[in-house]
Image (cartoon, grey):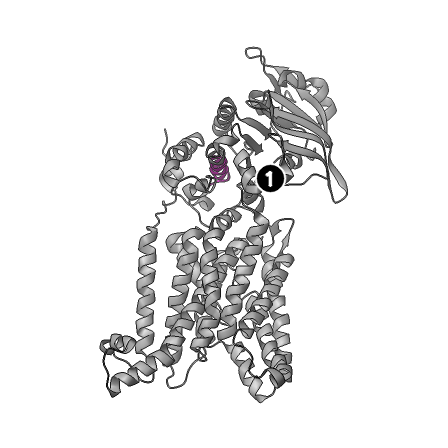
Amino acid sequence: MTSVIEARDIVIEINGKKIVDRVTLSVVAGEIVALVGPNGAGKSTLLRTLSGEIRPSGGTVTIKGRQIQTLASSELAQCRAMLSQHTTVTFPFTVSEVVLMGANPHRRRSDLSALVDKVLAAADIAHLTSQVITRLSGGEQQRVHFARTLLQLETADEKCRPGLLLLDEPTSSLDLKHQLSLLANIRDVATAGNAVIVVIHDLNLAAMIATRLLMLRDGSLFESGAPRDVISDSTLQQVFGVANAAGVVPSSDLPFVLPHSGRIV
Amino acid sequence: MIAASAVAPAAVRRPPAWLIILVLLFLLIAAIVAAAMTGAAGIPAGRLIDAMFGLSSGGEFERDRLILWSIRLPRIVMAMIVGGMLAAAGAIMQGLFRNPLADPSLVGVSSGAGLAAAATIVIGDRYLSGFAGQMPVEALPLAAFVGALVATYALYRLATRDRRTSIAIFLLGGIAIAALANSGIGLLVFAADDRQLRDVTFWLLGSLAGATWSKAAAIAPALLVVAAVIGFLARGLDLLVLGEAEAFHAGVSVQRLKVGAIVVVAAATGAAVSVSGIIGFVGIVVPHLLRLMIGPGHRLLLPASILLGAALLLFADTAARTIAAPAEIPIGIITAAIGAPFFLVMLLRQRSLATL
């Protein structure tokens, strides 16, 4: 299977400091890759490089065989959508106005409504469409931006399918129910044939959604593989410095992380 | 299930775009009629059409026609162009800096344009008049455009770092740029002779009293450029509200958008300042009023700003001509008297922005 995105020997230096050091990865259609690792491991920086937002100091990123640097931002937006970690809106746009900003500008408005309804339902914000986004809670705002990102992916040119969805901490401000429904949305995106790369802190959520985990430590790839293989006592100890935290849910064979058996006192 | 909507904020309903444009057009026509009728020699409504198209002849009608075509209309046209461009410049600038408090006159862009225009008057007059005779009417708009461009670009470089715009540095930097430009204007006032001084003082107060057809014609191309370009800026400015990275992810060529926006702001401000001096607060009041009514989407906000800016400045200019008739109050005083309290109220309501 051909890969949707390929990164080779990515090096990112910011102000002389190496944030990412020779990372190579490739993601195929239908795959969900979770980038995990401790704070400051370079996950978000790597993701922003894969999106074309940051130009790497070394190495190359290709999306469907084309060098990312040679693509105009409008072409790139047809092939990949990205949800940033924090998005703040300064003007009183309504929810539906913000979601529609994600739509491909070359699509006619009248063709959009079915797709808009679909992403509004997916993000569970159909009841908020005429509200002003700045008055919503952080989690609700995050869902609005997720719907906008989904709409960008859904309205992309046919010739760009399968597309690429990049997500930076999409679950961080969501409640339990919406964390789970967001994971289900991500799975649907991958089932539809798209490639997904998601930066995620919560290892349990990562294990539930990812077909492959890439664990970063100090900017380099430490371990890569199925969640069951990557989440082990020894990697958690070496990467996070946390002992005896890995377990396996007997019914589903999914790994889980529960670092402390009692209250922290 | 427990209803959680007891304290939910009210839904926002936006009026249809055609209705807004229609209402603004009516407002603009009302402003034009009021301005055409009012003045030292009044033209009653019944004779206005006649005077406009020269349908009847006779002493009274000849007089009306002369007043309308050589005094009132050039001033009306210029007030509309200046008001429309100042409002559009404000709206675009607010989108570019993601800050509803941005205004060309407030953050030194108008002062930059004024400095360049004043320098052209004083220095150009001294060194060029000898062999070139009268300066071409386009010289001032061009100089003001360059001055506005330098000021806007400097402001942008000051306030934006790592793709983030600091609102505090934006406003403070704007104050510094305005102070610098004003000190330059002060130096020129000091160096000017009496005749030049009269011209330069005119910039400082802001007035449409010097309106002529040739001045209106000199700045009309700038309005056409602004009107033609805003359609291309609208989607990018909407997305820029979410942040530069988000705009890029959604397919906006951010660099091109910013260069385009800066050039348009400078062209609109420079052209306006070159014929009318520094008229403040139009760019802040008009887009803010419109956002309350039609929302912040730039596709409608930018054309609506041009229409409302034109209408409001025309009303303000008519007031400036009549309040203390036969004397004339500089229009900059009227717009500041309305705009400054307006700005303070906005500042109080958006205090959270000021801490950014």
- Image point 68% across, 17% down: which residue? A232
- Can residue B55 be spotted in the picture? yes
- Residue A245 percent location from the top left of the image: 67, 20
Magenta-drawn stretch contains B343: no
* Local SS, label 1: loop
Q: Residue at x 63, y 39 (%)?
A: A70
The quarter of the rendered structure image containing the N terminus of chain B is top left
Extent of the magenta region: A136-149
Residue B354 visible to the viewer: no
Residue A144: within the magenta?
yes
Residue A110 to residue B112: above or below: above
Residue B75, horizontal then vertical, whole percent: 40, 76
Q: Nearer the viewer, residue A46 or A264?
A: A46
Q: Indicate the position of residue A254 as horizontal and vertical percent values.
A: 58, 15
Q: Residue furthest right?
A: A16
Callout 1: 10 Å neighbours few (<14), some, many (20+)? some
> Between A97 and B5, which is closer to the camera in this rendering?
A97
Give the residue pinned by disc 1: A71
Q: Is residue A220 left or right of residue A250?
A: right
Q: Is residue A171 left or right of residue A111?
A: right
A99, B252: nearer the viewer: B252
Q: Number of callouts in the render? A: 1
Q: Nearer the viewer, residue B216 or B182?
A: B216
- Main SS category, magenta section: helix
* Badge 1 amino acid: Leu
Subunit that carries the residue with mark 1: A
Q: Residue at x 44, y 47 (%)?
A: A93
State whether residue A131 is above or below residue B3: below
| Relative horizontal placement of residue A91, taking residue A33 as reference (left or right) | left
**Residue furthest front in the image:** B131
Q: Residue furthest top?
A: A250
